[in-house]
Image (spheres, rainbow, N blue to C red):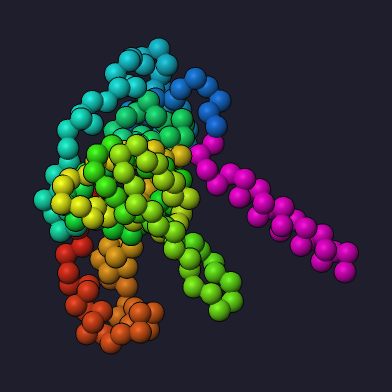
Amino acid sequence: MAFKSLILAIAIMAVLSSMSHASDPSPLQDFCVAVDDTKNAVFVNGKFCKDPKLVVAEDFFKSGLNMPGNTSNNVGSAVTPVNVNNLPGLNTLGISLARIDYAPYGLNPPHTHPRGTEFLVVLEGTLYVGFVLSNPGPNMKNKLFTKILHPGDVFVFPIGLIHFQFNPGKTKTVAFAGLSSQNAGVITIANAVFGSDPPISDDVLAKAFQIDKKGIDYLQLKFWWDNN
């Protein structure tokens, strides 16, 4: 019995330990500018570090966020990200951001960021935003939190939860989002479920969504637009 208790305690400690490292780790140096060249470089948090003696101001600089994204697509929105993949100086700093443009009635479809909490501030226009809670209790539905945002308003989407933004107005909307990860990732629900490669089995999706396979085939054949 004591042995079983010990094993259980070790298992719980392992889970808690993994949870405590669920976000980007804190840096142990001033910076670690990401570089593709592996010669004389150190691998840290998914990227190689540039030799500090070769680091320049441009490694921490990016321009262009004053330019609107192209919203001429099926969902009517465009995300312009700034993360470690296009701003090397962000490596190990645990933050990123994005500009999001919305055409009239444009939508940033339901999606999640598996590695980052997001806060959103509206600069221009109006947004209807919301997120859905996970793990509802017995006989409960996933609770939805929504809000109408105007210029200067801020809204937070907790890490990993499904959320969306919709422009209900007849004029364009512009917002900026900050994320608590250098590379928060994005999983757009419809794209991932119906546009995966290879496709998820019709049997799986038909049973999951309680519709016939013809309906699943129709959804899988649609072009799922990536607005990122």
Looking at the rendering, the stretch of residues picked out in magenta corresponds to 1-25
Nearer the observer, 19 or 200: 19
Q: Residue at the location (46% across, 22% down)?
A: 31
* Residue closest to the far left: 72
Nearer the observer, 11 or 23: 23
Q: Residue at the location (46% across, 39% down)?
A: 180
Give the image quarter of residue 57: top left
Give the image quarter of residue 12: bottom right
Give above or below for 139 relative to 150.
below
Give above or below for 62 relative to 150.
above
Give the image quarter of residue 179: top left
Q: Position of residue 220 (x, y in %)?
A: 22, 72
* Residue closest to the far top: 53
Is any atom of residue 64 visible in this view? yes
- What kind of secondary structure does the magenta stretch mostly adopt? helix
Is any atom of residue 81 visible in this view? no
